[in-house]
Image: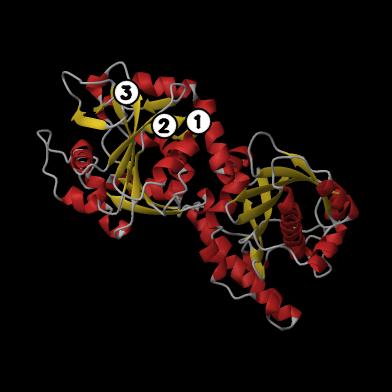
Amino acid sequence: MAISRKGILLAGGKGTRLHPLTMDKSKHLLPIGSFPMLAYSLCTLLQAEVREILIVTNPEDLNTYQDLFGDGFAWGCSLHYKAQAKPEGIAQALLLAKDFLQDSPCVLALGDNLFSGPSFKDLLQKANAQNQGATLFTTLVSDPEHYGIAEISASGKVVSLEEKPCRPRSCHAVTGLYFYDEHASSLAESLQPSERGELEITDLNRLYLEQSQLTCIPLPDEFLWMDLGTLPALKQAEKNASLWEQQLSHVAPWVALQKQLGPQIQLSLSFLSKETFLQFPEEGVVVQGAVEKRVKDFSSGRAVAHKALHHLGAVPHPLLSSPQGSPLWPKGYVGSISHTKNAVGAVVGKQKAEGSENYLWGVGLDLEVAVPLPEKLHDKILTSMEKEWIQSWTGSFPKALLAKAIFCLKEAVYKCMLPCGNEGLGFQDVSFSIVESGPTPGCFTAKIHPEENLRKRYPTSFQFQSQVALHGETLLALVSLNQNN
């Protein structure tokens, strides 16, 4: 049975072998296809069912990684950060992570190691099931003198470990993915620096070997593993970019959706987090006048939207006008937010440079998709056409969650209509047909029917787009409207 582990993602070092590409940026920020290298290593930990992860990197790159990956919400995990003042070996990461780990088992992944194979998740589950000792992954290489090498007996037992040996005893290279029990940090404290002045990860693994608590899992022949420490390896990884991207899309559908939608979802994901939303009271259960609720609703939303826009370097100001010419946003700020039990509705807007484009997004968020919709509410929100779509659905998105997805979509549309006036349309006035959005599991596009209902509130120059993404126990619906000036 798999145990709960914390993850360490090592993204330190100077990347000198990749100069001049790394003279002004961290190696792990170099792009492989549409995403930085480290994104794929992060996905390795996510596939191992690790949900609390510490990124260890250089002090000068720390803010960049925090801006890029945030608190991990869009990735379906919780991310923490730690600066490595001076790179002194891979095993040093376990010392830096000691307070983070708090004696929990862990998995350490190197940010420049990429893995892909049809049985990878099964192999990770096998490693995660080991309650004691350390588990490594090995693969056959043609140049063993450049890697940590494991000598393995005919029965599959590890006989010896060597770090970049001049005369290798085998061709089984140890890859940059290490599963450890709760004693890893304590054992790392007993290590002495090698002749290179580093705390060698091979020395730590050797301590586990001496205790007869080291297991190696060989990667299958068809498996693809890459150590991206050199320019030829980087170029080869770029050739396989579509493979890495497809894997990322399966593991992190929200992030894949960000690539598809570009700036529309970037702003939404920059302020969507469970902690952010739950800091506001649950308005749906408070008995108060409509005006009071409306003011509170906009006030909360402005605070969240202001924070998001400030983070992106934008200045909040009046965004759009309704067909009647009145400003959509009170007091010049963009955004509103409301709660209905575990579901959240929000609206946020962004205005680009004058003469460019205006964007408006409605957001429907369900923080616990496992909680079913009440039957009465189910009947109220679904039209007959939507019920037919759900009944005949054969796409990859979970059929059992389609009703909730439609609820979140309608919440998003309703929030878009709300700023235009008190006579906003109801849930039954807008319906959706669902269209699969390509190879990304957990995502689908939705077509709004009829658009005329929305055009009663917005100029005909608006274009509408609807997307849904599922990650873990959180469901996001995004309705975006853009207006070309």
Q: On screen, 221 above or below 284?
A: above
Could you tell me residue 84's position as x and y percent?
25, 47
Residue extending furthest toward the top: 142
Q: Residue at x 61, y 47 (%)?
A: 265
Tag shown at residue 244:
1
Relative to 475, does residue 26 appear above or below in the rendering?
A: above
Asked if the residue under mark 3 is in contact with the one under mark 1, i.e. CB atoms within 8 Å, the reply is no
The amino acid sitting under disc 1 is Trp
Q: Give the secondary structure at mark 3.
A: loop
- Give the residue at x 26% y 35%: 14
| Location of residue 343 by image quarter | bottom right
Residue hosting label 2: 114
Of the numbered discs 3 and 2, the one sitting upstream in the chain is 2
Residue type indicated by callout 3: Thr
Asked which quadrant contains residue 202, the reply is top left
**Amino acid type, mark 2:** Leu
Can you tell which of label 1 and label 3 is closer to the viewer? 1
> Could you tell me how many numbered marks the image carries?
3
Q: Name the residue under label 3.
A: 230
Q: Is there CB contact under 8 Å for labels 1 and 2?
A: yes
* Mark 1 secondary-structure assignment: helix
Q: Which of marks 1 and 2 is nearer the N terminus?
A: 2
Q: In x, y percent, where is residue 353?
A: 60, 46
Q: Dot 2: few (<14), some (14–19), or many (≥20) neighbours within 10 Å?
A: many
Residue 340 falls left or right of residue 390: left
